[in-house]
Image (cartoon, rainbow, N blue to C red):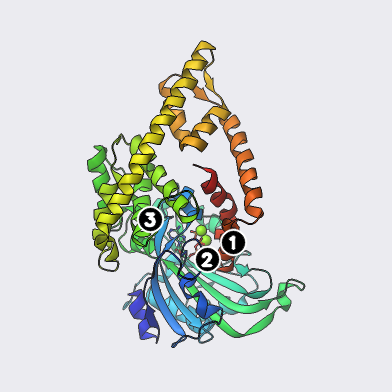
Amino acid sequence: MFLDFFKSKGHTIEPSVSLVPVNDPTLLWINSGVATLKKYFDGSVIPENPRMTNAQKAIRTNDIENVGKTARHHTMFEMLGNFSIGDYFRAEAIEWGFELLTSPDWFDFPADKLYMTYYPDDKDSYNRWLEVGVSADHLIPIEDNFWEIGAGPSGPDTEIFFDRGESFDPENIGIKLLAEDIENDRYIEIWNIVLSQFNADPSVPRSQYKELPHKNIDTGMGLERMVAVIQGAHTNFETDLFMPIIRQIEQLSGKTYDPYGDNMSFKVIADHIRSLAFAIGDGALPGNEGRGYVLRRLLRRAVMHGRKLGINDTFLYKLVKIVGEIMQSYYPEVLEKRDFIEKIVKREEETFARTIDAGSKLFDEVVAKLKTENKTEISGNDSFKLYDTYGFPLELTKELAEDAGFTIDQNGFDVAMKAQQERARAAVVKGGSMNKQSEVLTALQDKSVFSYTENTLVTTLTAI
Ligand code: ATP
Ligand code: MG
Ligand code: MG
Ligand code: MG
């Protein structure tokens, strides 16, 4: 519907391209719809049609640790976008956005479920939302709604949130959190409209930035969040996109998925196998650096959560087929490459199984030593070594420790982790490829990606 709508407004539908960036060594993964259209935005290629729309698969490494903690972040997700390269601007972008969301011919959402945030000085967006029919008490100013990366194109953005209703927040605290730009489960960010309007000049206040001669529009809507809203699902995970995977994990583990209970392991596995299947299908392979490292980390995290559910055998590769089946109408490539993807996933699972065994051996030695010393606490250094060298998440060490009648020194672990991160960060600042990625992520107009990136990419780099 999204693509059809923008086609009816004169946009050309662009295909969803590989997650592995083509001719772009600065970017680790395609992380948004606009990332694939960079050549049009930077002017190096003139598009046949300045209006484009796409549904693009994207991977965000900055959200790895969010998966399962929030139910609205995935490592791989689809972003729907409409783009204007020096063609239409604010008036149409806002009007069409509202039409698509509320028209009975399209998504038909009640307008009173929608809240729009805007940059406080961006009175034009505020007024345009009023003109198209949004009431003033649904317009929320947020200081952070401005993207800018030093000198060059910059501008305000206006984001659309869907109110999932009282059951997500009976006391309606969420609206206060939204106004403070804090994520919450009731008001879900579904769409971001970025208005590339100014030429930023860091030497003067923003109010004095000059208008760009050619203004661009870049938007991004999260497909999985929209599906959750449209299907009335409790979260993204109880939708057609994820439930068939979760059902298979139930079969493999013999455990039951409870949407309202402790289900993080189900969510992590269901999420990570999608990224693995798609990324490997697109030609990335698990390894020790860059993209490969991200895949290795995702796979290990999923395997660990499998163990938490009591699955001790290789199992992830068995989920590739269902991922391919769910996605095949738009992404036939996963089923087409199923054999290859399964083989890679299985081999990597087997390698990791050996590492886990080595880690378990270290764990047993640590425990034996503590016993002879009459101690009951596993030191931060030991739990960090298990984490860092053997890929044991702290929660796993903690569980194993509890089973053996021991505790862990959380503080000591945090200190060791921090020291490691600082070492890694120093290395990144010296000019690794990751540094480039964070520049590109920033350049791709996403402030939140940037704010997470430093932390999480570095963690990703050092975690295994
Ligand atoms: P959030 O604040 O929820 O992390 P964001 O502001 O980082 O989202 P944008 O960069 O504005 O996200 O991306 C546009 C849209 O893509 C968001 O409005 C959201 O619907 C969706 N989206 C962003 N990150 C994810 C993710 N990790 N998983 C699923 N959907 C996402
Ligand atoms: Mg956003
Ligand atoms: Mg956001
Ligand atoms: Mg984000």
Q: Secondary structure at mark 1?
A: helix
Q: As displayed, is residue 421 above or below residue 457?
A: above
Q: Amino acid at mark 3?
A: Ser
Specify the label residue 275 is tagged with.
3
Q: As displayed, is residue 111 above or below residue 366?
A: below
* Pair 1/3: label in front: 1
* x 62%, y 52%: residue: 428
Label 1 crowd bin: few (<14), some (14–19), many (20+), radius 10 Å:
some
Residue 114 in view here: yes
Viewer-proximal residue, 161 or 176? 161
Q: Which label's residue is closer to the chain start, 2 or 3?
A: 2
Specify the label residue 436 is tagged with.
1
Number of labelled discs?
A: 3
User: At which x and y percent is residue 214?
Assistant: 59, 86
Query: Which image quarter: residue 12?
Result: bottom left
Specify the label residue 65 is tagged with.
none
Locate residue 83 relative to residue 55 in the image: left or right. Answer: right
Locate residue 381 relative to residue 67 in the image: left or right. Answer: right
User: At which x and y percent is residue 340?
Assistant: 28, 55
Q: Amino acid at mark 1?
A: Lys
Residue of label 2:
25
Mark-to-mark CA distance, 2 and 1? 9 Å
Q: Which label's residue is closer to the chain start, 2 or 1?
A: 2
Whether label 2 touches label 3, CB < 8 Å: no
User: At which x and y percent is residue 63?
Assistant: 48, 53
